[in-house]
Image (cartoon, coloured by chain):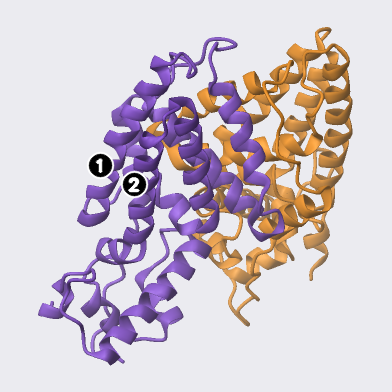
Chain colours: A purple, B orange
Amino acid sequence: MTPGAQHPDGPAAQPLRSDAERNRERIIAAARTVFGRDGLGASMASVAREAGVGIATLFRRFPTKDDLFDAVFSDRMDAYADAVTTALENPDPWQGFTGYIEAACAMQAADHGFADVLTTTFPGAKAMEKRRNEAYEGMVRLIDRAKATGRLREDFDSSDLVLLHMANAGVVSATGDAAPDAWRRVVALLIQSLEAPARGPLPASPEHDALYQAMLRAGRADVTAPEPGKSS
Amino acid sequence: MTPGAQHPDGPAAQPLRSDAERNRERIIAAARTVFGRDGLGASMASVAREAGVGIATLFRRFPTKDDLFDAVFSDRMDAYADAVTTALENPDPWQGFTGYIEAACAMQAADHGFADVLTTTFPGAKAMEKRRNEAYEGMVRLIDRAKATGRLREDFDSSDLVLLHMANAGVVSATGDAAPDAWRRVVALLIQSLEAPARGPLPASPEHDALYQAMLRAGRADVTAPEPGKSS
């Protein structure tokens, strides 16, 4: 592992040499394509292939797949966390709540890789997980506010947001470019189902720990070891 | 292509030699595992690997991937078509309609490969597509009956069933064994959203042709050519 591999990210970071920076950007763009197309389980080797760099170069820049996830999706996760903040600022808690759902689902539709990131947890992707946790705390407040007005059904659980995003990920990945707005209809149906008064009881929510295990499981992917001596 | 490859399937078919039959069953079981785990885009080579047979043996038995889909999923598709028939026999059209949704979604949860099959079209898998078309005709009647009683919202479109199954596939594939019943809650929400009177308007349905393109696209997968001279 070279010192460069642990180089901090973000605008305040010391600039990398420009060819290194170009490599980094090329890898990130390639990873976005590959994760969007093949899912988050895609191998590091296929990211290197798409980027046209050697696997050793990829691992030098991103020692683990979680480091790569962090680099590829942290801006998306920032935008997601910002959507929660915006929703909390809405003076109408129900509008804030439903607006958040629409905004977050639109982010899933715009980036299929991110669609899965929203329902997957990567304990090693520290920056991204920190933002996710902040967003989660905001979401709990969003839910409480929407319930307090009586517009959101009482049996709504924060885990339902995860399930809703899993459902939306299924729609956006299956419809893709062929029917790029189809998800809007499903999300509209789901939002209508959440409005109080509830039309009936619901099966129990999954245990939060079970759902966390599901989110963890989706992120478990083989990390291909670098091929010795191969670089670019 | 050997004559055996075009051997008719089903109870009335002339029995294959027992070792050939065992190979066939092993391939089908392996394909079920691979498609369930890696999606319908999994390669023929990975099915052969999982089955422990040579790729040439696989292609001799199943000359195209659609032939393999037919063999792996036609019993599921039969059960699915039967669920539509059962639903149409229910004296309460709304109960029939919602019972069908629950039954079909349960089939998706029980077999993740089949979860995608329900929202994917394989023009070459003749037997399966014939059953699907029969089921579709039954679903249209199911929808008409449920609307006639006033229980199903008027703006419900047959394409909404496809979207609903895409959403459910997203939930079952993301939750998997960790939270195997989570889909029931999402499906219950969706069913509640379908009950008349509608709580609000919906974004337009995707064009049927666009949705067909999406269903076609999901089934497009690379078919690996047999490696010459390799058999088992």
Looking at the rendered image, the quarter that the N terminus of chain A falls into is bottom left
Tell me which amino acid carries mark 1.
Answer: Glu
Give the structural element (helix, strand or loop) at label 1: helix
How far from the left and from the top, in percent, is residue A15? 20, 82
Task: Read off the chain for label 2.
Answer: A
How many other residues sit within 10 Å of disc 2, few (<14), some (14-19) or many (≥20)?
Answer: many
Q: Residue at x 64, y 54 (%)?
A: B19
The answer to whether residue B113 is above or below residue B192 is: below
Structural distance between the alpha carbons of marks 2 and 1: 7 Å
Q: Who is closer to the viewer here, B103 or A99? A: A99
Res B14 seen here:
no
Residue at mark 1: A134
Give the structural element (helix, strand or loop) at label 2: helix
The answer to whether residue A219 is above or below residue A71 is: above
Q: Residue at x 35, y 65 (%)?
A: A72
Question: Are the numbered discs 2 and 1 placed on the same chain, yes or no?
Answer: yes
Tag 2–tag 1 contact (CB < 8 Å)? yes
* Sequence-wise first label, 2 or 1: 2
Res A176 seen here:
yes
Task: Read off the chain for label 1.
Answer: A
Residue at mark 2: A81
Position of A190 compared to A70: left or right?
right
Q: Quadrant of residue B91?
A: top right
Q: Determine the residue located farthest toward the top in the rendered image.
A: B91
